[in-house]
Amino acid sequence: LISRLNQCLHKQLRKESHVIIAAPISKLLTKYLALPPEQIVLIPPKRVVSFNETISFNNHTRPDGEWLVSKLLYSKTQAPDTPNLKSFQRLKECFNEITGGYEFDVFSKFELSNENGEFEGRNVAQLKFTGLSQAAWIDAEDCGLGFSDLLVMLYFAVCTDYSIILLEE
């Protein structure tokens, strides 16, 4: 899996300056490589991808995966030839290649909830995966954490402009 990840990232990265390191050493890199901290991202070991999150296009995707699903839905719905849509398509290609044929996608739905006797509606972005047979889409919450963790790592490698990506495990 690691060699597939490295091969895919090598092909897909827009800049050759991207590096994946498995240790929290951003201060040392900032000091010795003279990179500003905003060019370095640390992906923490505990990721919190929300598989069904209220759609919000105002929030930035956090390194722990928060707001990732909304960002993916936003990117998916952009006009052809826009940078966000191209990044989304590259992300899907990398995910498919690394997982050996599995796919992910994001969908929107309207959800009603009854809290305190009042009905409240919200638009929700849903993350789903499909297997090799591509017969049915499976909710991400029913798939374990491996695919969603991979998606967070790939998102920051393929869809952002960080010079260095630190991966803490």
Image (cartoon, grey):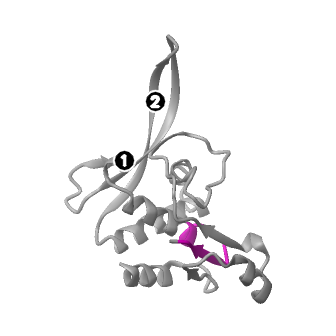
62 versus 54 height, above or below: below
Q: Quadrant of the N terminus?
A: bottom left
> What residue is drawn where x is 51% and y is 52%?
48
In the image, taking residue 27 as reference, residue 43 lies left or right, namely left
> What residue is drawn where x is 51% and y is 60%?
46
> What residue is drawn where x is 29% and y is 48%?
138
> Is residue 22 shown in magenta?
no
Find disc 1 in the rendering and name its residue. 141
Amino acid type, mark 2:
Phe
106 versus 18 height, above or below: above
Front disc: 2 or 1: 1
In the image, taking residue 158 as reference, residue 150 lies left or right, namely left
Magenta span of residues: 156-168
Find disc 2 in the rendering and name its residue. 110
User: Splitting the image into 4 quarters, where does residue 18 fall?
Assistant: bottom right
Q: Where is residue 169 in the image (x, y as percent from the top left)?
A: 50, 71
Amino acid type, mark 1:
Glu
